[in-house]
Image (tube, rainbow, N blue to C red):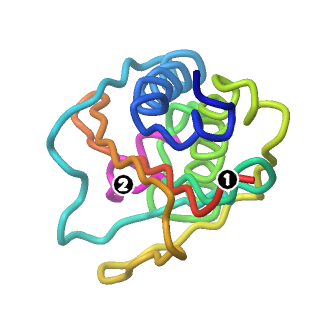
C-alpha cells in the first residue's frame, strides 16, 4: 500500500478528482455542466490564465486558461450580467473559478485537504506567454467544455513534503 505522500505522486489518483472538481464548480457555482474533452483551449488566441499557488503538503500550482469569450461567459454566470469587455471584474471571476477548482480538487485527497494551502489568484493575459514551474513531480493537463466554450485546467506539482 502506498504511503500518503507516494499516493500523491500517482497522476492516476488526481485526474478523476480534477474532472469531478471542475464539474462540481461549474454545475454548483455557475449552473452549467462542464465535461472533459480532447480539444485544447484558445490555441494562438489571446488568453486569460488564472494561477493559484499550492503550498504545504504539496507545492505547485493550479491554472485555468481560456479565451476572452469563455472568460466573459464565466463572469456572466458568476454575477448574472455579461460584462462588455475584459475588465477587473472578469479577471476576478476567472481567479475565483480557478480558486474554487483548486480548493475542490485538493479537498478530494485527505492529505491535501488538511495540509495544503492555496494562494490568492494571479491573472495573466496575452497572446504569447508561458508559465514556467520548477522541476515537476507530476503534471495534469485537462481540457473541458461548457456550453460552446473550452477551457484548460492544469495541476502542476513541484514537490511533495
User: Viewed as shown, does residue 67 lie left or right of 160?
Assistant: left
**Which residue position holds label 2?**
66
Q: Badge 2: few (under 14), some or many (20 or more) residues near its Cα, within 10 Å? A: many
Q: Please name the residue shown 31% across and 36% down the image.
A: 144
> Principal SS element in the magenta part?
helix
Disc nearer the start of the sequence (2/1): 2
Q: Where is residue 122, by image quadrant?
A: bottom right
For the N terminus, give its image quadrant.
top right
Q: Please name the residue shown 68% across and 58% down the image.
A: 59
Using the numbered discs, state the Cα–Cα distance from disc 2 to disc 1 in whole angstroms: 28 Å
Q: Position of residue 134 (x, y in %)?
A: 54, 76
Residue 153 higher or lower than 21, as above or below = below
Magenta range is 64-75
Q: Position of residue 4 (x, y in %)?
A: 68, 32
Q: Position of residue 16 (x, y in %)?
A: 42, 24
Q: Position of residue 26 (x, y in %)?
A: 49, 25
Q: Please name the residue shown 55% across and 50% down the image.
A: 94
Q: Residue furthest front?
A: 1
Element on which disc 1 rests:
strand
Q: Badge 1: few (under 14), some or many (20 or more) residues near its Cα, within 10 Å? A: some
Q: Nearer the viewer, residue 160 or 104?
A: 160
Q: Residue furthest right?
A: 114
Residue 50 higher or lower than 130, as above or below = above
Q: Is 74 one of the magenta-colored residues?
A: yes
Q: Is 28 one of the magenta-colored residues?
A: no
User: Viewed as shown, does residue 61 lie left or right of 132?
Assistant: right
Q: Are marks 2 and 1 in contact (CB under 8 Å)?
A: no
Q: Which mark is residue 160?
A: 1
Amino acid at each position: 500500500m502506498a504511503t500518503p505522500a507516494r499516493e500523491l505522486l500517482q497522476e492516476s489518483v488526481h485526474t478523476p478528482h480534477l474532472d469531478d472538481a471542475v464539474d462540481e464548480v461549474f454545475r454548483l457555482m455557475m449552473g452549467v455542466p462542464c465535461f472533459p474533452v480532447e480539444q485544447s483551449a484558445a490555441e494562438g488566441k489571446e488568453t486569460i490564465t488564472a494561477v493559484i499557488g499550492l503550498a504545504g503538503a504539496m507545492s505547485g500550482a493550479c491554472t485555468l486558461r481560456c479565451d476572452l469569450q469563455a472568460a466573459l461567459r464565466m463572469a456572466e454566470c458568476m454575477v448574472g450580467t455579461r460584462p462588455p469587455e475584459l475588465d477587473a471584474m472578469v479577471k476576478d471571476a476567472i481567479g475565483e473559478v480557478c480558486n474554487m477548482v483548486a480548493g475542490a480538487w485538493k479537498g478530494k485527497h485527505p492529505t491535501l485537504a488538511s495540509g495544503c494551502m492555496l494562494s490568492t489568484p494571479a491573472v495573466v493575459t496575452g497572446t504569447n506567454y508561458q508559465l514556467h514551474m520548477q522541476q515537476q513531480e507530476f503534471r495534469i493537463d485537462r481540457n473541458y467544455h461548457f456550453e460552446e466554450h473550452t477551457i484548460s485546467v492544469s495541476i502542476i506539482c513541484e514537490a511533495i513534503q
